[in-house]
Image (spheres, rainbow, N blue to C red):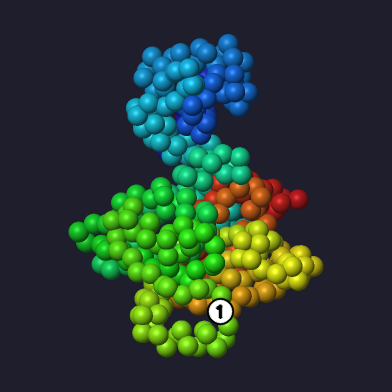
Amino acid sequence: MIRDLEMIERIAPDMMQTVERRFRILRNIYWMQPVGRRILAQKVNETERSLRTETDFLKQLNFINASKSGMTLTEEGLQVYKGLEVFMAEYSGTRVRERELSQKLGIARCIIVAGDSDEEEKVLESFGAIVSDVLDNELPDGDNTIAVMGGTTMKTVAQNMERLETPNRHNLFVPARGGVGETINIQANSISGMMAEKSGGDFKVLYVPEQVSPETYENLLHEPTVQRVLELISEANCVIHSIGSALHMARRRGMSLSELDMLTNNRAVAESFGYFFDEDGEVIYKIPRIGLQLKDLKGIPYVIAVAGGKSKAKAIEAYIKNAPKQTWLITDEGAANQILKEATL
């Protein structure tokens, strides 16, 4: 495909420039809709006059609607935009950067979504479809048990997942950990339930807090209902999790001021699975917890980490130093470009 694109560019460079330009316009309308022409022109770095010519043409093709509130994609426009994403990724070299990123991080695969989720919420929303696509293509037929972590990123992924159930494959979603003492809709129990609902699978819940005293931990492990779910978690052949910024996650978990000071003094940058890491990937603190442990990931065939935004670059690098080699990272250009940029400094 790349060679074909190179031939097209050589014989008709203006054609590919037009395709790139119109794709960029459709993408930004999708991200910002409804959006006015002035704001869109600033976003795509064009004059309003030149942009009007393109948007008028796209309206004639029934790709966009225009109203008083701004421009939006039509259903046909959305289909064209989604179809062009793969094409333009190949053309723009995204696949090359994905290989560079996976080699730098030392993991099986990286998938880079266009944009920066720090700036555009729609970028984060697109992770759900990517996760669904990976699971659909990678999970084997038969029964699969998928352990799911909680968090705001995972909630957005769950909300945007697509149907995965087939006559030959059944997926059971289980929480990878107990509750964090935070808003219920971002706890692992809620996320696994939402993923099951969206994908057509089933789910089980783990009714225990994540952080408990050693005495309580031992007592809970002997509860039959807890034992059954923990057994399912231990049998998981797939795990989906996010990667958090250390201090943000510490505050969300309600950690004490002394603990926050300790993390700051030790330059913690990342958190995942209750482990806090510095920039070198060294574990500087671990929260006693019920559920999946970091060491358990080595024996799980399919591990999907989801994190995006330029602000998450250091957290991603720090955590991935501890990730199993079979990990797939789903991220965006904001994080990927920052990580690859730092690699060349």
Give the amino acid type for the residue marked by disc 1 in the picture. Answer: Val
x, y percentage for residue 309?
A: 61, 48
Of 317 and 129, which appears nearest the observer? 129
Of 219 and 40, which appears nearest the observer? 219
Looking at the image, residue 18 sits to the left or right of residue 80; the answer is right
Q: How would you rate the neighbour count of disc 1 (Cα within 10 Å): few for under 14, some for 14-19, many for 20 or more? A: some
Identify the residue position indicated by label 1 in the image: 212
Q: Disc 1 on helix, strand or loop?
A: loop
x, y percentage for residue 66?
A: 44, 18
Q: Is residue 60 visible?
A: yes
Image quadrant holding the N terminus, namely top left
Looking at the image, residue 313 sits to the left or right of residue 144; the answer is right
Of 249 and 213, which appears nearest the observer? 213
Q: Is residue 109 visible?
A: no
Name of the residue lying farthest toward the left: 167
Residue at 36% over, 19% down: 62
Q: Is residue 17 above or below residue 241?
A: above
Residue at 34% over, 52% down: 198
Residue at 45% over, 52% down: 157
Residue at 66% over, 68% down: 255
Residue 4 found in image quarter = top left
Name of the residue lying farthest toward the right: 265
Looking at the image, residue 323 sits to the left or right of residue 340; the answer is left
x, y percentage for residue 72?
A: 44, 25
x, y percentage for residue 83?
A: 39, 35
Q: How many marks?
A: 1
Of 123 and 186, which appears nearest the observer? 186
